[in-house]
């Protein structure tokens, strides 16, 4: 049993109802909720003083917070997590939302990238949030690889796949790399890649790196133990991130600090840092997952939430993910079925192409 479930089980009916009403009101309005407001909506008639005592108890548990001097309360990140895990009522996908998604994605023509671009636009339009789409990796065997230096901080890698597919990707090379060292690296990799995918090569390289690290650790330990030394401390996927709906988030009403957090979010997005982790968020299994605030590995500085679901190919293998990101007061009950249905729709479209 999770910690959230334990706390919920230990609450009496009144505390659970007060907590639920505060969170639901906050998700709808973004405003703190006061005791007098609650007395008008509670199923049992109690005084405002009684409600305030319950709110204080919930605040002591770390589920509520007082953003201002006023008596109003809002849920904390822990409180939102508990609500999502134990009290969230996920609605059915509305017919209007379903039709909008199907109309936008119904045309299974053009390349996969174009189709997924339309997915991002549709998700953004339907949810009025920012959409994230991780496209599938190209898994064909590599025939040839080449690095081209474009300057001290930019380079191009050319990948030629056995099925004739060619990809050109810009990247920032490690400091100190020269055109000569890049040619040597390409020659080394070309000797390894025959009959292997990019993922195979990366895993082989990591295995070799781990083996070398182990050798170094053994040698270093021997040198330290002998007194000769003192111990002083101890590749890129083809996924691309499609971002849609920036204006929707920037138009979200809220305080200046909330907008600053959202701008920080987009700084992270535009630098495309840690893109590989986005797919890792979904690799634990099927279904929609919700990451709130600092739980969100990609955007922990933004104070935002991510609702994400993997999509699969015809072999039931996870090949990408779709999601919606926005303020922590997202309408989770509506967003979850939208993301879930979109992931299923994308998986079906890609499987049909196969």
Image: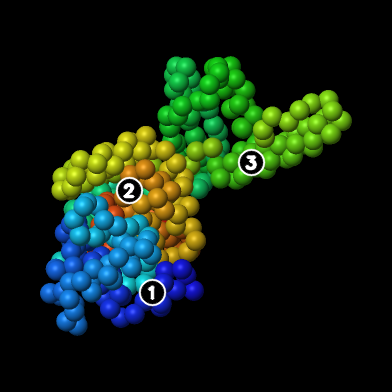
User: Which residue is identified by label 1?
Assistant: 8
Q: Position of residue 270 (x, y in %)?
A: 33, 36
| Image vertical order of residue 51 relative to residue 328, above or below | below
Mark pair 3, 1: CA separation: 45 Å
Q: Quadrant of residue 79?
A: bottom left
Point 45% across, 54% down: residue: 281
Point 71% across, 37% down: residue: 213
Please name whichever residue, 203 or 50, is drawn nearer the observer in this view of the structure: 50
User: Which residue is identified by label 2?
Assistant: 303
Marks 2 and 1: in contact by CB < 8 Å? Answer: no
Mark pair 1, 2: CA separation: 24 Å
Of circles 3 and 1, the one toward us is 1
Of circles 2 and 3, the one toward us is 2
Point 19% across, 83% down: residue: 44
| Image vertical order of residue 201 relative to residue 151, above or below | below
Q: Position of residue 220 (x, y in %)?
A: 78, 32
- Asked if residue 334 lies left or right of residue 281, the reply is left
Number of numbered discs overlaid on the protein picture: 3
The numbered disc on residue 346 is: none
Q: Residues within 10 Å of mark 3 (few under 14, many from 20)?
A: few
User: Which residue is identified by label 3?
Assistant: 206
Point 38% across, 64% down: residue: 61
Q: Position of residue 319 (x, y in %)?
A: 45, 54
Q: Can residue 135 be seen in the rendering of this structure? A: no
- Asked if residue 310 lies left or right of residue 68, the reply is right
- Asked if residue 58 lies left or right of residue 177, the reply is left
SS state under label 1:
helix
Which residue is situated farthest in the bottom direction here? 44
| Image vertical order of residue 314 relative to residue 146, above or below | below
């Amino acid at each position: 049993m999770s910690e959230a479930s334990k706390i919920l089980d230990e609450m009496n009916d009144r505390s659970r109802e007060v907590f639920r009403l505060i969170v639901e009101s906050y998700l709808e309005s973004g405003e703190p909720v006061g005791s007098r407001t609650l007395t008008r909506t509670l199923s049992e008639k109690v005084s405002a003083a009684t409600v305030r005592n319950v709110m204080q108890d919930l605040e002591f548990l770390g589920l509520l917070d007082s953003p201002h001097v006023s008596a109003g309360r809002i849920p904390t990140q822990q409180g939102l997590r508990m609500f999502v895990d134990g009290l969230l009522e996920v609605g059915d996908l509305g017919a209007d939302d379903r039709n909008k998604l199907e109309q936008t994605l119904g045309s299974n023509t053009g390349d996969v990238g174009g189709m997924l671009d339309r997915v991002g636009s549709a998700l953004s339009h339907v949810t009025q949030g920012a959409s994230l789409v991780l496209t599938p990796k190209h898994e064909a065997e590599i025939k040839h690889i080449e690095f081209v230096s474009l300057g001290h901080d930019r380079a191009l890698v050319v990948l030629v796949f056995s099925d004739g597919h060619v990809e050109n990707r810009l990247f920032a090379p490690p400091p100190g790399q020269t055109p000569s060292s890049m040619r040597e690296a390409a020659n080394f990799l070309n000797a390894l890649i025959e009959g292997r995918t990019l993922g195979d090569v990366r895993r082989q390289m990591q295995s070799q790196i781990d083996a070398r690290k182990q050798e170094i650790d053994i040698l270093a330990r021997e040198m330290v133990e002998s007194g000769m030394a003192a111990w002083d401390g101890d590749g890129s996927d083809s996924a691309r991130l499609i971002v849609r709906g920036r204006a929707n988030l920037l138009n979200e009403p809220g305080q200046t600090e909330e907008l600053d957090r959202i701008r920080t979010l987009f700084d992270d997005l535009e630098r495309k840092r840690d893109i590989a982790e986005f797919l890792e968020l979904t690799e634990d299994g099927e279904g929609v997952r919700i990451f709130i605030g600092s739980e969100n590995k990609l955007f922990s500085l933004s104070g935002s939430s991510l609702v994400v679901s993997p999509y699969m190919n015809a072999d039931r293998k996870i090949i990408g993910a779709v999601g919606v990101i926005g303020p922590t007061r997202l309408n989770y009950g509506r967003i979850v079925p939208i993301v879930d249905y979109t992931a299923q729709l994308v998986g079906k479209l890609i499987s049909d192409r196969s």
